[in-house]
Image (spheres, rainbow, N blue to C red):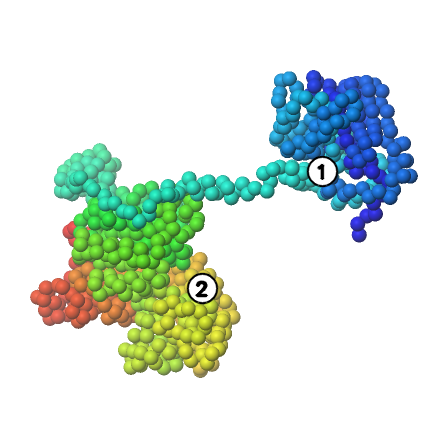
Amino acid sequence: MKPQRNQGSRLSQLARLRVSSPILGIGGLRTRGSQARILGPLHISALLPLLRSSSSPAHVIIDDAATGRTLIKHYGNNTKDYTKTLRDSNQQTHHHQLVPEPSSLRSGLFSCSTTGSGIRKREASSTPLPPSTLLAPNPPSSNSVSSIGLSSVSPAVPSYPISPTYNRCFLIIPHRPSPRRPMAFNTYSTASSDISTPRSASPSTSIVSARSSHSSISSKRLSLSLQRRQSALNPMSSVDIAAIEEQMKMAALDGLRGYAQNHYGEVQQYRSTDYIPQSAAGGYQVLREPLWNKGLSFTPDERVSKNLTGLIPHAMESVDTQVARCMRVINSRQTNIDKYMYLSSLKDQNVDLFYRVLIDNVRELMPLVYTPTIGDVCLQYSTLYTRPEALYISIKQRRSIRTILRNWPYPDPEICVVTDGSRILGLGDLGVNGVGISIGKLALYTGAAGIHPGKTLPIVLDCGTNNETNLKDPLYLGLRARRPSPAVAQEFMDEFMEAVADVYPNMVVQFEDFDTEKAFAYLARYRNKYKCFNDDIQGTGAVVLAGYIGAVNLSGVPLEEQRLVFMGAGSAGVGVAKQMVEYYTRRGLSEQAAKEKFWLVDTKGLVTTDRGDKLAEHKKYFARSDNNGHQFRTLEEVIEYVRPSALVGLTATFGVFTESVVRALKASVDAGGSGRRPILFPLSNPLTKAECTFEQAVQWTDGTVIFASGSPFSPFAVKAGDHAVTYWPNQGNNVYVFPGIGLGAILAKVSKITDEMVYIAAASLAESLNAEEVHKGLIYPHIERVRDASVVVAREVMKAARREGVSTLPEEQWIEWEEWGDVALTKYIKSKIYDPFKEKSSL
């Protein structure tokens, strides 16, 4: 309940101070020229000792602002206090009047033109001052007077000019009664007082000592009250300064504002770049070319013939020693980003040593070169950037694509990875920062399949970005504009593909991390015209299919009883499901019967034809029409309805496979009979986007799960009595498939990449496991054997290309291989594989 106000306490509401030439300081009131300053808010009881001090000014009058009656008069050493008389009078005659709430009082400075003691004119200052400020006629040396705060270090307060014609001014201030005043005069509660009046002390010696005993709560209230008062009286307090500064920053960064965005010029280069051939290079020309530099592996003859004497240490080291040094440096780095930066620097200096380190330590280093570390690298690419590693083709230079392609320093690349950065892993639109995915992917083409690094070409198509963080980042390296319409992006892509086919007709193009709609559209548009494929759709589908083939053999669930739920209906999810449809059609099912084994779930629930929303084109193929009008909104509802044997996750959402979801999957499998095992594939990259962890999957299925993930997990041991049972995870990484597809397409000189070639890649990977891996229950080879698996995949892809009629190799070559079989073809493939510090294929 609000405290009852005492109507007789008008003096506690407000006071008017009228001053001729005083100044109120920390030690008391004093006169200094004609300048007047005051520390406030004032307490009348505390002011009396100041008025009587030796430093008191000549004249001070304090009036009641409501009645105009004088409260205190001070002339020299004579001080008269009328407050008691007025108080008694108010109690007798004014108890019926309603005194306004402090929040309704208008505090501020008022200037008065006077004649004698009568006020003739009264004007409010254009900018009200804080209640603690008293302003008098300006001193000769200044055009303004500033307020002084109570603290020893005063906050900055604006100065306000006043015309020197005014010879008197007064200040209206809310007033808090002295703590010594009887309770009857305390009109407002503590809380109310905090809102209306700052808890500041009178500037006297006694108050200074008293202020030191204030509680921490009082100090906080004082600070809060001062902030509120300054904010309320600040004309800029209602202005969103941060928003204005952000707009100014964005305007400064937007260098394309006001220019036409549909006019494109063509770069005219007036000379070609002359590169020194390796045979003629010497000295630093050799050491500074990463493809030629062999570090401490140069022989004495090479050091002499290449003029390297003295330019490198006088020592020769084995490759093993150099690899050990590199691994020691890597292990000394604290973060994965630091390790990646060291590896990137090593590749920029000595390509052979970089790939030797990667190949010999693929289990430890592949997560650094690709997922999950590459996701963090892409997020920070503009900050981490030190040197160019790719071709950066801006839509602003779309008329110069051929010129840009010809500027690549290494002749006749055989494979490129191109992205526009619109959907990098599960991280969204990263714009030009997505170039890191092209660089990392090509490192795996070399490390996992032996494609020579001088024959690889990473490309990013810079079409702008819709990522607000990048647009606001002053270090962002890409086009600072939003992405164009799909039609314009399609025109740009058409021009790019035409230019690639013109400049590098033998190069295979792999599309990477385009957003879902463009990924399907571009693949459908170009697959029969150019030699290209999409790893997100076809590569992911092939590697998951390979794992699924092995998992079906281990699950104990008959093929005809297999039912699959896909959580995620994007390009990867639909691509994987379509690959699996082909698996079933090859085993005798019709396409419709095979398609009915799949239930796809997105953020709105089960994908159905009657869900009520407009389905994306790529989702329509798997949209269910047998739901009888019932809509299933959650994954749990779908599992209860479908009773699946396998659950595949491609959502890029960490933890979407909860304990209840996984246990429901296990229950549906167990219901079919004993000895059956659930199949669980949380495939999203990087690890921070995985639908669940391997440890969770093992615990929630009591160790029966057949598990494969997109990023690597460590083995998990469970103690059982006197011994421990070790469970081995599988990594369904695309690295098992796309390098072999690329290598096979290059060596077969294909005119296009067919569905048959992609399917055969999956089937051959499933058959590449050795006895040890089968005994452990694995469905993919050990990552250390990824090169062996790539040779098998490349061989089968080449044979499929021959059957499909898309290989352009000479007929005589195929007749020889067909005569001698896999031994001859495998030998040919291995002879073309790049193996650093060993016999290498020529460029």
Is 109 located above or below residue 392 in the figure? above
Q: Residue 328 carries which label?
A: none
Of residues 572 and 46, the one nearer the viewer is 46
Circle 1 residue? 106
Q: Which of marks 1 and 2 is in front?
A: 1
Q: Amino acid under label 1?
A: Arg
Q: In this view, does 565 lie to the left or right of 801?
A: right
Using a 10 Å C-alpha cutoff, classify the residue at mark 1 as few (fewer than 14 neighbours), some (14 to 19) or many (20 or more).
few
Q: Amino acid under label 2?
A: Glu
Is 299 located above or below residue 798 in the figure? above
How many callouts does the rendering have? 2
Q: Which residue is drawn at 80% across and 52% down?
A: 1
Q: Residue at x 37, y 72 (%)?
A: 620
Quadrant of res 304: top left
Query: Where is residue 628 drawn, in percent x and y?
Result: 46, 81
Of residues 569 and 369, the one nearer the viewer is 569
Quick one: SS at disc 2? loop
Circle 2 residue? 691
> Marks 1 and 2, how far apart in space?
61 Å
Q: Are marks 1 and 2 in contact (CB under 8 Å)?
A: no
Is 143 located above or below residue 591 in the figure? above
Of residues 727 and 582, the one nearer the viewer is 582
Q: Which residue is drawn at 82% across and 20% down?
A: 75
Query: Where is residue 504 drawn, in percent x and y?
Result: 18, 54
Quick one: SS at disc 1? loop
Quadrant of res 17: top right
- For marks 1 and 2, the one nearer the N-term is 1
Q: Which residue is drawn at 42% across and 72% down?
A: 607
What residue occupies the far front of the structure in this picture? 120
